[in-house]
Image (cartoon, helix red, strand yellow):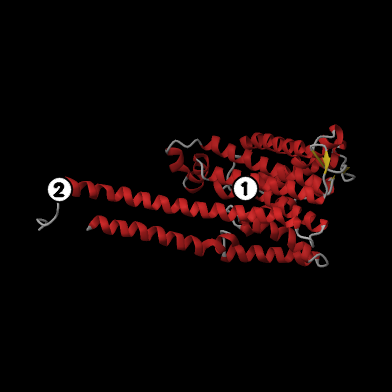
Amino acid sequence: MDAHKDNSPTAQDSQTDLPRNRTQAVRDLKRRFMRNDILFSALFFLAMLAAPLFPDVKGWMLSQASLVIIYIIAAMGVLVLVGFTGLVSVGHGGFLAIGAYTSALLTLHLNVDLVVGIVAGMAMAGLIGAVLALIFLRLSGAFMAIGTLGFAFFVGTILNNVPFFQGRDGILLDANHVLGIEIGDHGFYYVSTICLVLVTLFVFALVNSGTGRAFMALRDAEKAAMASGVNRLKYRTLAFTLSAAITGIAGALNAHVVNYVSAEVFADIWYSVDILMAVVVGGSTVIFGPFLGGFFVVMLPFFFEQLADFSFILKGVVLILVLRFAPAGIMELLVRPLKNARRRRLRKIGGSMAAEEAE
């Protein structure tokens, strides 16, 4: 039946090369998709950096934009934990407060540079996050969420009752300085944007690394991942630490956006809820999800400033609708057509190469 088939060494080598060619073609297309994503991200961040150069941009606009960026960074921290490890935290407002007060106290007593304050806030939040991870990771599901919520309440109680933190009177800070140069709203916006770029690059690199794949393996199939040699305690402790450290960066920036910290602000449990909501609404499986979520959480009350109660109601309504119709978040819903188109192109290449192999 197959007498007509060429079994010569040359033909056999050609058939052996077909699977390799198919795999290489798929890899090349994936690299092209990656380059396109990087190009889009670069253009997006360049547009952010160019925004203050427009003549109609006022200082208060940049201050509000900086607040949006701060929430995006905080949501990126939660994204590392919720989106890529599947753990739920309702207490990241506590890490936000730790980052804020660490930077504020160092600035008040040692007159440190803004950059030093940001790094210190990140380090302190990450250190405490690592310690708490050893406690919280013994819990799971709703128990862990309740545990982290208790941590946020604990931080709020400390801020309210320990005189060193000056309670509801708060700590008023001087103008921000970077390398000894005083910066205003424009300068602070650039510092915030640079922090956002660095955090986004870090999260992107983390997700596409072996560590990120270990995070997601534990999220998707914990027992199978552990059977494959993934150390559950090690990787989840690392995820919790990195998540807390990134949120600490947002906290340090939050302390300096208005140069004031107070227990009345940072002891509020709604900070934790808003950060988690930014991730859920924006999308917990897409790196750019927190961008949309942070904008939503900050700008909705801004647009409904005269109807503060209505903005809270609308937040709740949007959250319910997202959980019902787009449980992976609005950003995932928006990029789904692009993902499907890319998936079809990959299948088409794989299918065409498989057809050539069968001939």
* Residue at x-position 50% and y-position 62%: 338
Judging depth in this view, the residue of 81 and 1 nearest the camera is 1
Local crowd size for mark 1, using a 10 Å CA cut-off: few (<14), some (14–19), many (≥20): some
Q: Could you tell me residue 178's position as x and y percent?
A: 79, 40
Which dot marks residue 200?
1
Visible residue check, residue 347: yes
Label located before the other in sequence (1 or 2): 2
Regarding mark 1 in the picture, which secondary structure is present there? helix
Judging depth in this view, the residue of 84 and 194 nearest the camera is 194
Residue 127's quadrant in the figure? top right
Judging depth in this view, the residue of 195 and 249 nearest the camera is 195
Local crowd size for mark 2, using a 10 Å CA cut-off: few (<14), some (14–19), many (≥20): few
Q: Could you tell me residue 51's position as x and y percent?
A: 72, 57
Residue 6 located left or right of residue 205: left
Q: CA distance from mark 1 to mark 2?
A: 53 Å
Visible residue check, residue 145: no
Regarding mark 2 in the picture, which secondary structure is present there? loop
Quarter of the image containing the C terminus? bottom left
Residue 1's quadrant in the figure? bottom left
Residue 289's quadrant in the figure? bottom right
Q: Residue furthest right?
A: 169
Q: Could you tell me residue 46's position as x and y percent?
A: 66, 53
Q: Is residue 298 above or below residue 154?
A: below
Residue 198 located left or right of residue 164: left
Report the residue marked by disc 2: 8
Dot in front, 1 or 2? 2
Dot 1 amino acid type: Thr
Dot 2 amino acid type: Ser
Contact between marks 1 and 2 (CB within 8 A): the answer is: no
Q: Residue furthest top?
A: 110
